[in-house]
Image (cartoon, coloured by chain):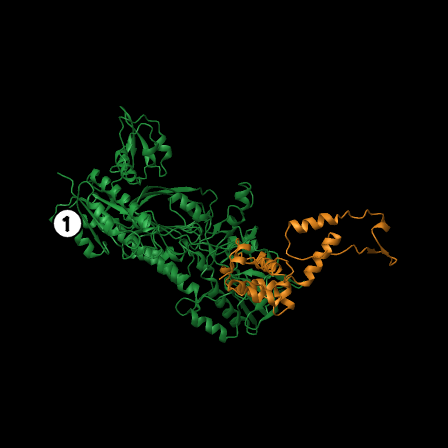
Amino acid sequence: MLGTELKKLISWIQPEVCFGCNKCVSGCPVAEIHNEYRPNRIVRLAYLGFVDELIESGVIWYCTQCLKCSERCPMEVYPASVIVALRNIASKRGMTHEAWVKMAKNVSIYGKILPDMGVMSKDRKLLKREDLGLVAPAISRDLIRRLFKESKLPIDIGE
Amino acid sequence: MDIRIGVYICHCGKNIASTVNVDELREFASRLPNVIVARDYIYMCSSVGQDLIRKDIEELGVNRVVVAACSPTMHLETFRRVLEEAGLNKYLLEMANIREKCSWVHTDPKKATEKAKRIVSMAVKKVSSVEPLQEIRRRIHKKVLIIGGGVAGIHAAIELAKAGYHVTIVEKMPTIGGKMMFFDKTFPTLDCAQCILSPRISEVTKLENVRIFTNSEVVEVTGGPGDFNVRILRKPRYVDEMKCVACGNCAEKCPVSVPNEWWFGLGERKAIYIPFPQAYPNSYVIDPDACLRLRLRRDVCGLCMQACDRNAINFDMKEEFTEDRFGAIIIAIGGEPFEPSKIGEYGYGEFKNVITGIQFEVLTNVSGPTKGEILCPKTGRKPKTLVFIQCVGFRNENFNRYCCRTGCMASIKHAILAKEKLGDVDIYICAPEVRAFGKGYEEFYKRAREEGIKFIRGLPSELKEEEDGTLIVEVYDPISDKILNIKADLVVLSTGLQASENHRNLSEILKVPRSPDGFILEKHPKLDPAATPIAGIFVAGVAQGPKDIPDSISHAEAAAARVMSFLAKDELELEPFKAEINNELCSKCLICMHTCPFNAISIAETDSEVKLIVDEVICTGCGVCASSCPTGAITIPNILPKQIMLEVEAALEVSI
C-alpha cells in the first residue's frame, strides 16, 4: 500500500503497526488548534496510499516537529518522521510550502532562518551587534549556496 | 539377519508435495542400498498411512523403517508406536524431516527435491547401523511439589490431593492466597474475592495430604522426571504459628512502621504484622528488614514479646532447609504488577493522585487503608471525576509487548464499583480498544456504558498536575473529533501482570525455558499448554502468561490433570539415549563433569578405583560430554561417531 517512494524514505519505520490508540493526537499542540490535523490520520492516509491527496491538502506543513507523537507512540511508528518524508516528496514535486521557501531563502542570505534583529535596551533603543561591540558573524554566502547545492535540497532558492 | 529397510514418504497434504517431487523422491529411495520398499501417501500419520508400514513389516519382513515427513517432535512417537505394534523394536526407526527442514523453507521444487533426497539417504544410512535398544524404567515418586500458593497453586493442590496424591505447596510470602487476596470484587459477576477464595484456602489447609510451607523458597532441584530431589529454604517467621491467635497486641506495641507492600505503598504496617485478616497461616510474622531487634542487637526493643501473652514470639528461630523427593513439579508463581514510574508522561510516583489499578483495588478493599472508601491519596477527599488510562506499560514496544489481558475488565469493574460507592461521579475510561472476550464480559462492558461510564477510544499523551492535586487529562476522542480537557481528581493507570525476577530464578533452578516475554514457556501453546518442555515439570496460571481468574483456574486444573496422568503409571519410561562412559578409556580429566549442563555426571569412589558415573534420569542425551571428551570415552547409543560420519557421507554423497 505504502508507495515505494515513501517506503524508501521511511524504511526504518512501520506505519502499518499503528493500532489507533490516538495518543499522538491527544498530546499534539497543532491538533489542538487545527481540527483537520491529526498525526495518526496522516500516517494512516499515507499507509493507504493517499500520498497525493496529503501533499495537495497542505496539512503536512502544519507539524512543528516537537516530536511528542514520536516519543510517546507505544508502537514506535514515529508520525513526525512520516510527515518529514511526505514534505520531502512534496518538495521534490516543487510543492514546498511558501513559508519553507522563505525560510530557505533566509538561510541562503543570513545563514539562519531569521536575520539579526538586534536587541531592545532598557531605554528602548534598538541595538545592533556592532553597537554592542560584537563581531558580525562571518557568513560566506558562496559556501551556503554550495551547501544547498551539495545537499540537493529540493527547494528553489533563486539567485 | 539382513537389513530390510522400508521408506515411507508423506505428502503432508500439500505441505511437502507442493515443493518436493514425491514420485521422484520415492523412485530415488527405492534404489538406495538395503531398501526393499519405498512408498508415499498423502497423510502417513493417519491410520491408513500407519497401516501401510505395519503391513510391510508383517508381510514383507521390513525390519528398519525410515519415515520421511515432518519434525520428529511432531510424530516420532506416533511411528514408534506403529513399529511396536508390529512387533519391531521402536528404536529401529529414523525420521527424515523433509517438511520443516526442506519443503517449508525452500521455494525451488528442483533444489528442494534434491535436498529431500539427501535427507532421506542420510536417514537410510543411519537406520542401517542402529541397534535395537530398551527404554530405561524408573520408579515414580507419587508426590507433587507446587511452587506458588496463589489461586492457581491452591486449585491444582486441591484437585491433586482429592485424587490421592501427596502435595506440598511452597509459598514465598508469609501467607498463601496470592494476588487475588488484594481484590475486593471480581469481574464480571462482582462477587467478593474473599468469599470465593477463602473457602478454597480453608479447604486446602484441611486436606490431610497437603503440606504448606509459607515464607519458603525452592533453592535447589536435582534429579529428573519422576524423581526430583528438592531443597526448600524455610525462612523464620519469628512467631510460632501454633501459638499465635492473631490478636494483634504485638503490632499495637511495635514502634516500627514501614510501607505496607500488601497495600502497594498506600499505607503502612508495623514490623510485626499479618498481611490480611484471612491470611493462612493465621499468624503474625516479623519482617527481619524492619524489626529493630533483628536489625540491631538482641537486647533492644522486644516490646512485642512483652505484649504477647501466649509467648508466641521467638527471636531464636533460624533458617531451616527441608529436602524431599517429588515425582512432578507445578510452577504456579504468578506474576508481578507493572511499575509505571518508568513512564514519565503519566507522572506516576510524582503526582500523588495518579495510582495504579491494583492500588485502586486496595482503596476499594474493606481491609485496605481507607476501609473501602475511595479517597484521593493527596487530598483525602472523595473524587468527583475519575479517569482510567488503559494499556499502561502493555502493548508497548518499550515495555511489555503483549496485552495484559486483565486491564480492560479490571478498569470496568473499578468504574462500576466507584459509581456504586461514590454515587455522583464522572468516570472516563481511556482505552484504544476494550477487550471483553470472556464469558459475560461483553455484557459487563455494556452494563458500564448503561451506567454512564464514558469510554474514550484514545490514550492521553501526558498528565499535568495543578497545585491542588487536580490532574489535567488531555485526550482526543475520535468519535466527536474533539480534544477533551478533563479535570480529574484521581487518575488510575491500568497495569497488568508481568514476569518477575522469580521467573528468571526459577527457570535457572529448574532449567525450564522462558518465552521472550519472560514467562515460563509451555510445551505447546495449543496442544500442551500446561506442560513445560521439561518432562515432569508443569506450569499453571499466570506463571505461563497473563491470565484472569477463570483462566488461571482452568489452567491450574489442566496442569493438575496432566500431573495425574503423568503420575498414574508406576514407572517412567525414559529414552535410552544416555551418555555411557567407558572407564577404561576415561582419563578422569573431568571436562565432561564441568561441561554437562544438567550436572548429570558425578565421581564414584570405591576403595579400588575412581569412576565417573552418569545419572540416567538426569541425562538428556544432549551429547555435550561426548563431544568434549578428549579420549572419546563417552558415547551415546545410536548416536555414535561412526554413525554420524555415515550420515555426513550420505549428505555429501562421498565416502570418507
Q: Nearer the viewer, residue B192 or B111?
A: B111
- Secondary structure, mark 1, is helix
Q: Quadrant of the C terminus of chain B?
A: top left
Protein chain holding label 1: B
Name which residue type carries label 1: Asp
Q: Residue furthest left?
A: B59
Q: Position of residue A126 (x, y in %)?
A: 85, 57
Q: Nearer the viewer, residue B241 or B610?
A: B610
Q: Position of residue B507 (x, y in %)?
A: 40, 46
Q: Pointer 1: residues within 10 angstroms few (<14), some, or many (20+)?
A: some
Q: Is residue B107 visible?
A: yes
> Which corner quadrant of the image does residue B282 belong to?
bottom left
Residue at coordinates 78% horizontally, 48% vertically from top-left?
A137
Residue under numbered circle 1: B56
- Chain A colour in the picture: orange
Identify the chain drawn in green. B
Whether residue B297 is situated above or below residue B532 in the rendered picture: above
Count of labels in the image: 1
Q: Is residue B346 visible?
A: no
Q: Quadrant of the N terminus of chain B?
A: top left
Residue at coordinates 73% horizontally, 48% vertically from top-left?
A142
B493 displayed left or right of B18: right
Q: Position of residue B355 (x, y in %)?
A: 56, 60
Whether residue A76 is situated above or below residue B608 in the rendered picture: below
Whether residue B279 is situated above or below residue B290 in the rendered picture: below
Q: Residue furthest bottom?
A: B450
Q: Nearer the viewer, residue B479 or B468?
A: B479
Q: Residue furthest top?
A: B608
Q: Residue furthest front?
A: A159
Q: Position of residue B572 (x, y in %)?
A: 25, 46
B416 displayed left or right of B527: right
